[in-house]
Structures are given as C-alpha cells and as structure tokens.
Image: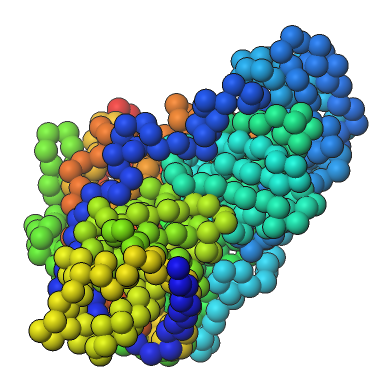
Amino acid sequence: MSTLKAHYRMDAPARETRIDRSMNSVIGKPQDRYEGPLKVTGQAAYAYETARNRKDALYGYFVLSTRGKARIIRLDSRAAEAMPGVRHVVRDARAVRGSADPSDNKPALIEDEVVHYGQAVTLVVADSFEVARAAARLVQVDYEPLDGDYDPKELTDTAYDPGDGAVPSTVTKGDFGAGFAAAEVTFDAIYTTPSQSHAAMEPHAAVAEWDGEDLILDGCYQLISTNVGQLAAALGMPKERITIRAPYIGGGFGGKLGIGAEAVFAALAARETGRPVKIALTRQQVFQMTSRRGETQQRIRLGATRDGRITAIGHETITSNCVGDQFFEPAGISTMFLYSGENRRITHRRTDANILMASSMRAPGEAVGMLALENAMDEMAEKLKIDPIEFRRRNEPERDPQDDLPFSSRRLVDCMDEGARRFGWERRPKRPGDLRDGEWLIGYGMAAASRKNMLQPASVRLTLLAEKGARIETDMTDIGTGTYTILNQIAADMLGLAPEDIEVVLGDSRLPQGPGSGGSWGASSSGSAVYTACEQAITALAKRMGADRSELGLANGNVIAGNRQVTLASLLKGEDLVIEATFEPGKAFKSTHQASYGAHFCEVGVNEVTGETRVRRLLTVAAAGRILNEKTARSQCFGGQIFGIGTALTEELVVDARNGLIVNHDLAEYHVPVNADVPQLEVVFLPELDPYASPLASKGIGELAISGVGAAITNAIYNACGVRVRDYPMTLDKVLAGLPAGHGPR
Ligand code: MOS
C-alpha cells in the first residue's frame, strides 16, 4: 500500500477546473442523503445511543445551581448516595462551565463559585436515569449569595469595548458624525432583539469510557479537534489520550461548537466509577445550561441624499455575555459591506451579566444584525418615497465599501430582481391597509440577505480501494447539513465512480483534521480537501497510465486517455492507493471580499382583531457560488426561512431579572415555529461560480437564508397594517397595541 501526500494552498482563483469539465455531473445534483437510510431506520447511533447495548453503562444526572452568582459553602450528598441504585456523586468538580466559543479554549473549572443560574454543580450517577434524577433532588447545596447582574437591559450604560473578536469591535471610515449631520435626509432608530435558544432536536449528550489512561468520548460536538483540546484542558490531561467520536449529530446551530459540561462530567464520573457513564441533558437543561444567543440593542443611523444615496451609515450594537466569556454577537457584520456610503461607523460593545453564556448561534451577527439594518433600510426608503428594492439598488457598492477590496462575486441585485419578478412585487399594496382578505390585512415585504463567506484549512484521507470504489475519512462532522453526501459527490464526480461505491467516514478525532461544522464553511473547506486529494489521485493515475493528467478522463470506473481506456482497478494492480491531502485558503481568499447573497420576499396576513401574524408566502432567491447539492442546500435554506419566522414572530428567551433563571426553558414555552406556522416555502438558486472562494467555486450557503428573513417578515407586517415594532419578536400584543383606533377589541 502506498501513501501519497497532497497539499494545496489556494493562492490563485480556480477557473475552469476539472469540475467544470466533468464527464460525470454528480456535483450539484440533488442526491439523497448518504446517511439517510441509516437515520430513518434508527441505525445511525447518536451520542447517547452509542451505549444502548451496554448493560454496564451508568446514568448521570446533573445538579444545577439554583442561584445566580453565589458561593457554594456546603454540598451534602449523603442522602443521595444512600438511595438504592446510586453509584456515585462527582466530587472533584463543583462547577464546570461549557465553552461554546471555539477560540476560547478553557472550559473553566471554577472552585466553589457559580456565576449563573443553572450552572452544573455536581453529577449523580446511578443504575438508571430515573434513580439518578430522583437522587439528584436529594443533594443539598448551601449557597452564600453574591451580588450579580441579571438584567442586561439595565447594563447598557456599562457597555465596554470588548476588543476584536471574530469581527473587529469597531470599524470606521470617513467621518460618520459629520456625514450624518450634513445629510439631506436622516434616519435614527434603536432596535432590540431578544436572547434565543439554539434548541437543536438532539439534546446535548455524552458517553464516556476509559481504557486505562485513554478516554473515549461519544459526543455531539461540531468542532471535534478543538473539542478534544478543550476536554483535555478541562481534565488536565494530554489531548493525545482523548478520542471524541460524533458521526451523527442531531443539529447544532452553534450550540454544540464547544465542549459541554456533560462531556467533562461524564469523563470524571467514568474515571471515578470505572464504568461507562452516559448523560443526556433534559430539554430544560439544554435551555438553562448550554448557551444562548445574546440579546442585542442596535442603533442604526442612516444619512442620505434626497435621491436616495447613502452618505453616512452607522450601526452601534450592544450585547451581553456571562462574566468572563469572550464572545460577542457581531451584529454589525453585514453593515460593513452591504451598502455604499462614504462615512461609516460600526461598533460592537458588550456588557457583563450573570446569565448563561452567550455564544454563536446560526449566522452569528447577520441573523439579528440584519433585522435592524434591513428594517432601517425599509423605513428610510419610505421616508425617501423610494421603492425598497430601488433604494437598495441605488446603494449597491462596486467594491467593498470598507476595505475597498473587489467582491469575489455578488449577485444581490440579481437576487432582488429575480425575487421581485417571481413574487409579483408589483402587486405589493401601495399603503398599509390597502389589501385585505376578510379580517386579515395583507402585506408584502422584502429584505436583502448576506452572509460573510469563510474558508478553513482541512485535511482528508482518500483511499482508492483495490477491490472497488473509494473511501474518504476525516474528523469533519455532519450536523444534519449534508457533509457526508457532498464529500461523496465531489469524489464520485472527480474520480468517475458511482456514489454508492464511495464510503464516507466522519466524526472521529483520530482521522485527519477537518474544519468542523460552523460558520457555513464546512462544505467548501472539507470539500476542497477532497478536491485536493482527488487531484493528486488523478496525477498518480495519469503517471501510471503514461498520460498527461490534463487529458485524463475518469468515468464509470474507467480511466481514459486519448483512445486508451482501462479500468481504475487495473491501474491499482491489487493495491490500495492512499492519499492524505490538506487544503488551505491563501491569497485568493484574502485578495477579495467574499459573501453569499440573497433576497427574501414575504407575504403576511395580520389579523386586525387579534394582531396575529400569519406568514402566507416566503420566497428566498440566493446566490452562493456553485451549489454542491441542490437538495441539501435547499434544505438548509428552508431551515433558515423557518428560523426567521420564529425570530420575527415568537422566539424569545425570558430571563428572570432577579437571578438569571431562564423562565421559558422548554419547547412548550419557548415558541419555535411548528408546521402550522410555516407556509409553502420557495427557494431559488441563481447560477454562480466563485473562483476565488474555493476550488469548487462554492461559497457558504447554510446560514445565508436565516440572514435577513425576519426583517422581510416584519417589513411585510408594516406594509400590511402600518405597525412598525422595533422590539423583536413581533408578537401579537405589540402589533395590536400599534393598530389604529377602530381596529382590535378596544
Ligand atoms: Mo454556526 S452558529 O457557526 O454553528
């Protein structure tokens, strides 16, 4: 068996690649999910289920802090330990907090002190889940209360510059103050968005087992290699001794980016009991002890000429996090590049609170920042008496208005125009109240979508199997996004193999390091590593064939050069060919500004009696480079649209301002959209190739559709009934309060 190495740093744009000349056309097809049959037949074992046949596995149940900031002065577990079936109460870790920020490599072991309500204090381990849960109630924890800050709304005066995070904390250009003061028409408003919960379908879970000094952890984490380091740091052990496996993950949305307390405690408990220990959080615990999206307060100021050219654009944001946590919601990210304007000021400020950690959640930044920006654009368009699409078109920048870089590709205007045509934008009611259907007032709204494109280094191992087909291996995860399927398609297309003959193995930290799932970088980054490996395979096969690689064609398991055709198997001569490939972004990425773009169009009905909003139609037109799988990409966009319905209308974590308790900590009280809330959804992709974004010419798609969609919905509400609420979510009580006299029950 021979092993080849391949390395590709993308310094030049990738034009007219082998994929463009492909004889196979597998990439892009709406291929069914690779692991779909395993999932629908229950054979895909999620973290907690990996121990389903282990009779020796013990069950862990958390005792959580019932105070906000407090010192633990006594922890008495005698009554719990006396209960039949209880095996252990974890002692040497009193308060372990998760770490949701991938840059934050330290799930802190905090001695004696809890900093927020719901923080893990200890774990009870028993023969059954029920016994562990019952015994956990018997653990006595005595606290000495400490002064804490529980109401982020009260803290905005203390907001401070947190320093640069994933995006800079402050971005300026020109002189915003002077530009705004001199503008012919100005707009100035504050928007607020609430804290939200990721609420993934699969609750956080971990199963830990020790083999001597080595730990094997089955978990549900998005960034396995980072998570190994975090777990090693928490346990004070070398990361070489830790394996994390997560081949199937039931949704993450950012809530599983970092290692969680369940992993740390399962590991501790397994070590102390000498048995495998499994933990699954209850839904209430997921809400209260993992992480959340931070609430925001966002001031938008726009200055424009009377004919609608923006001259000054300001977006100042404040968000909170738990004391000591580094993340801030980068709510101003789109404002940095979406519209022109020579004077600019975008800031991110943070306050510290004693509330559950805030972390990345689905399109961190855009998902809530674009609510404010895209509402403000509509409000300004109305002030200027310009159609909202036309106003955006007039402020379409030729280059990135902040750093003056060329855009790698940008079809925002095309998305708006195509959307307007398909949606029938010309039938939009001219004024609120113009169109009705019985007691329902009908309105149309739109918003732009953008999501910054990201690309990460990634490695894979590709094995051309002497027998038949190929295998791809990487620690990259698939959190429901389609990684398995897309990597399979890329290899099938480039190697001329049938998709069913290519095995994809993911989610094991012993495999070559992928980028993990986050930031919509997964498909392009790990796909580019597969591309790199396939290119190397083609070079090797060309050599064996005595042909020039550029003339080599691969199709139907055959290798073709000129008028010669042999089977791939015959070139392998009974020996597997192994390629270890690493891809990394280079100058092509840095020399351009990269983002995916789209436009959302929404029709709502607002009930004039109850103030209730029903979304009647929702269309998203998107351009995100090459679409690698039409079905999985569309599915991601449906998810974003539905997320946006929740964001606009119902989702809000309610925090008890006395102690930081999350009051509505389950799916009965935290309202995500259900089927009845979701109309027929439509998603259209505009053809686009972005040679700067990746060798696949693809950009991120996963988080694009949530970006801006909530604003399209609330803009439609305004168009329907004339009520503009700048405090999300736009629940019926807020709409009703704004309806003109004569409407509603008053
Ligand atoms: Mo995503 S919020 O980067 O998992």
Please state which of residues 52 and 136 is positioned toward the viewer in this rendering: 52
Front residue of this view, candidates 438 and 317: 317
Q: Is residue 499 above or below residue 179?
A: above
Residue for point 45% across, 53% down: 506
What's the residue at 62%, 54% (across, down)?
227
Residue furthest top in the image = 84
Residue at 42% from the left image edge and 63% from the top image edge: 522
Image quadrant where residue 76 sits: top right
Q: Is residue 135 left or right of residue 599?
A: right
Q: Would you say residue 71 is visible in this rendering?
A: yes
Q: Is residue 311 visible?
A: no
On the rendered structure, is 83 left or right of 370?
right
Residue 598: image x %, image y %?
27, 66
Residue 508 screen position, x and y as percent: 53, 52
The C terminus, quarter of image:
top left
Closer-to-camera residue (341/136): 136
Report the residue at 86% width, 26% height from top: 75
